[in-house]
Amino acid sequence: MSEEVKIIEKKEIPSGAVMIFGFPDVGLVGVIAASHLISELNDLEEIAYMDSKLLPPLIVLHEGLPHSPIRIFGNREILLAVSETAIPANTLYTIMYALIDWGKRKNVKMMISLSGIPIQNRQDIEELKVFAAASSPEVLKMLQDKGVEILKEGYMVGPQAIMLQRCATLGLPALTLLAQCFLNYPDPEAAAEILKQLTNIVGIKVDTSKLLEKGEEIRLRARDVMRRTQQELSKMKKAQEYDIPLYVS
Amino acid sequence: MTEKKRRSIFDIIDNYFESLEEWAERIMEGLIDKPSWNQKACTMEPLRNIMITPTEVIVTVDLPYTKEDTIKIKPIDNRTIEITAKMKRKIRFDEFGIIHHKGEFETLHCQTRIPVPVYMDKMEVHFKKGILEIRLPRKHEYTIPVE
């Protein structure tokens, strides 16, 4: 494990689980989806957390007790890594590598990143699409068999990009789900869509009705995390996802 | 005598853009590092975004949990607009789990500076899914003739 990043285990970590990432990105899709998973699946508990001097000097207080902003929740089937703060762009590689390498040591059978893909005129779109990209042709085929639309060409920037590339290198099955969403505004509807697709892929049953009911309150509450996330997204040149690639074959 | 190395025009341009980026970053950090709420005025600041196209400026403002008929858009001067919207109900700090601040909020409020000249009187406004969209045609004050 990297000297700069430690993952402190609080409980026994199940082997053979699916590891899911819900990190701050466009529309806060992953974070909102992960928070909803934690509140809906009653058996998800904090089993590990990240300790690193690379993170900003902050803790998150819950019931008066300190918590790391990056924590891993789990049950027998899933490990859910979630961050409650925007991750500094210059630390993203080290942090993602540490989490992925830790997951590999815990014999994770698949890694899934939940995120968004910004779309112009998002407010005019009623049915949001969810796209996917994979770390290997086998995972890609599995996604196609389940009817998931594949993001065939383009640039990907952020935690999900690092995850796919690292998992491809390590030979670990991985996929990224990207729901169409707002670029700069929290998007609970997109989070609900991505959770439906997660159910389709790994069979985790989660009711998204409360997420949609409370959507406006979530948007109000998520403003500050979104503002800080925007700042980091701009540092990692997120707008490059809009670029048309020049293919070298 | 020390020999002064001449800088190429590309180095100068690179340095210019680097310093511009640093400046923008500092401005952005300055905007962020303040509370997104005003306890005294009972207001919260909404998220907003500005897009500049060759013909218009599009301002969007995220106004969740507000009533459409309470939205007010007021030009402060020829480059600034003020936006207010009443929330569906008052929201207290303790509803967010915060008890070390007291207060409640009933309005989303912000002032936005438009970076280029626009026709304020030709403003078009739409509101959908809690997103306010303001379209302002650009005012082109001069043109450079192509010979």
Image: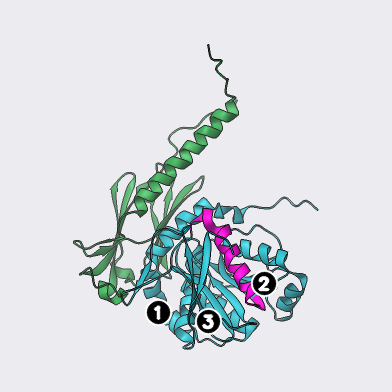
Q: Earlier in the sequence, mark 2 or mark 1?
A: 2
Give the image location of residue B52, x and y in percent.
48, 48
What shade does chain B have?
green
Q: Mark 3: which amino acid? A: Gly
Give the image location of residue B37, x and y in percent.
28, 62
Q: Which residues are magenta?
A: A88-110
Q: Which residue is tagged 3?
A: A74
Left or right of residue A85: residue A244: right
| Parent chain of label 3 | A
Pick the front one: A153 or B7: B7
Q: Mark 1: which amino acid? A: Lys
Q: Which residue is tagged 1?
A: A214
Task: Give yes or no for contact between labels 2 and 3 (Cβ–Cβ under 8 Å).
Answer: no
Magenta-span inclusion, residue A99:
yes
Question: What residue occupies the far left of the structure in this picture?
Answer: B40
Q: Magenta stretch mostly in which secondary structure?
A: helix
Say if B147 sits above or below B82 in the image.
above
Q: Which quadrant is the C terminus of chain B positioned in?
A: top right
Mark pair 2, 3: CA separation: 18 Å
Q: Which residue is tagged 2?
A: A174
Mark pair 2, 1: CA separation: 31 Å
Say if B80 sits above or below A118 in the image.
above
Disc number placed over residue A77 in the picture, else none: none
Q: Mark 2: which amino acid? A: Ala
| Parent chain of label 2 | A
Q: Is residue A119 visible?
A: no
